[in-house]
Amino acid sequence: MKILIQFQNHLVPVYFAVDTKQPIQRTLKLLTSALEKKFTSGKRALKKCLTSLISIEIDGSEAILHSKSEFDSLALSLY
C-alpha cells in the first residue's frame, strides 16, 4: 500500500507491507514525529538523507529512508 505524506514541503511516498500488524495511522504518526525530531536534532548524515528523501518503506518497526543517492539511504527505528 502507498500513502503520501508531507515532509519539508515535499510529498514523500510511504510504502507499507500488506500484512502489517500495526494500525497505519499510528505508524504514520510515529513516522512523522520521528522525522521531524531527527531533522531538527539529528546528525549530519541523517540530515543529508532527509533533505534528499525520495521515498520511505515501512518494514515492521523500521522505516527505510531512500534518498536520491543510494549511499545516503538508511534505516530509522520507529519504536
Image: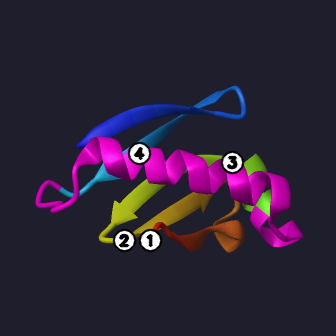
User: Mark 4 Cα within 10 Å, few/some/many (few <14, many 20+)?
Assistant: some
Q: Tell me the number on the disc at residue 79.
A: 1
Check contact, mark 2 vs mark 1: CB within 8 A: yes
Residues rendered magenta in the picture: 18-46
Q: Residue furthest right?
A: 44
- Residue 61, quarter of picture: bottom left
**In front: mark 2 or mark 1?**
1
Mark 4 lies on residue: 28
Q: What's the CA distance linking mark 2 and mark 3?
A: 17 Å
The image's colouring method is rainbow
Height in image: 29 above or below 17? above
Check contact, mark 2 vs mark 3: CB within 8 A: no
Q: Earlier in the sequence, mark 2 or mark 3?
A: 3
Question: Dot 1 lies on which element?
Answer: loop
In reply to whether residue 47 is colored magenta, the answer given is: no
The type of residue carrying mark 4 is Leu
Tell me the quadrant of the picture where the C terminus can be found.
bottom left
Report the front residue among 6 and 53: 6
Residue 62 is situated, as x and y percent measured from the top left of the image, at 43, 71
